[in-house]
Amino acid sequence: MARQSLAPMKEIDFSSMDPINMSVSGKVGRRRKDAPMTHLKYLRKRSGYTLETLSEITSISISYLSRLESGSRRLNTDLIKRLSCAFRCEPAELLQETSHESKLVSPVEFSRNRRLDMSSRESSMPLYYVTPDPEDQSKLMIKICSPAEWRQRPAELTSQGELLAVKAGHYFAPHFSASSTLYLEPSSNLIPESTVVILNKGSILIKKIWSVTPTSLQLCDINDIDLLKAGKLPKDKLMEIDRRNVDAVYKVVGYSDFCIA
């Protein structure tokens, strides 16, 4: 099985565009109740989102989402990125002009369809595991699991960009149980008190960030962060590393199904 690289992955920046606040007239642009459902609205309903939920996930205002669905506003590159990530579909699917006939769906049918839709996504997120390098047992390498073990993306992490799912095993003890799955994102959004996984020369280090600069990190043990904040530990307990001299730094945004960021 081929080796896999843990090089940082590109992240979609959802903060580059502020929510757009636009008022919608009570009459202008009102659609007939029997009008066909637009494809964008179909994708939203297929994903089980209300306009309010989709607005929270994408940081696009409810009124602007409504206008996008009605066709009175057009998609741009930034909106396509946000929405395709939320719907977990290819960007090209958002640009289809297919209309869907409106019909009432019972709660039971919707729930059943939702479960089937979610079950079809269970293998959509590759899962990796850590193992000793067969050529040098003192070093570690990462390998990809069988597709049968791949994970469904947790609902709590829908708005995140690219994530790396890794089986904890015993390599992330004692902070995470052997049965946990860690969800890691690239190091572009590091902030103080974030939990980070540092990979360097085949070794794994799990720490809390005390301070961060573009080139360096001051780190402390996870259990020491509260003592340092209270001034009960000296600052010489901190570890400083040059970010340019390590293989990769990832922020832990979740483990199993619970967000810890």
Image: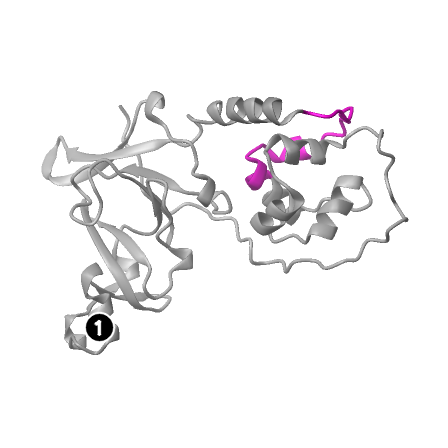
- Specify whether residue 95 is in view: no
> Where, quadrant-wise, is the C terminus in this rendering?
bottom left
Find residue 207 and report its horizontal and vertical position in percent: 23, 58
> Where, quadrant-wise, is the N terminus in this rendering?
top left
Give the image quarter of residue 4: top left
Q: Look at the picture and state if 7 lies above or below 125.
A: below
Q: Look at the picture and state if 40 lies above or below 99.
A: below
- The structure's colour scheme is one colour
Residue type at mark 1: give it. Answer: Leu
How many labels, in total?
1
Q: Is residue 94 left or right of residue 202?
A: right
Find residue 30 and report its horizontal and vertical position in percent: 87, 43
Q: Is residue 134 left or right of residue 130?
A: left
- Toward the viewer: 43 or 31? 31
Q: Look at the picture and state if 171 lies above or below 207.
A: above
Find residue 212 and report its horizontal and vertical position in percent: 33, 68
Membership of 95 in magenta stretch: yes
Q: Which residues are magenta?
A: 84-105
Q: Which residue is mark 1?
A: 228
The kind of secondary structure element at disc 1 is helix
Find residue 194 and report its horizontal and vertical position in percent: 33, 59
Q: Residues within 10 Å of mark 1 (few under 14, many from 20)?
A: some
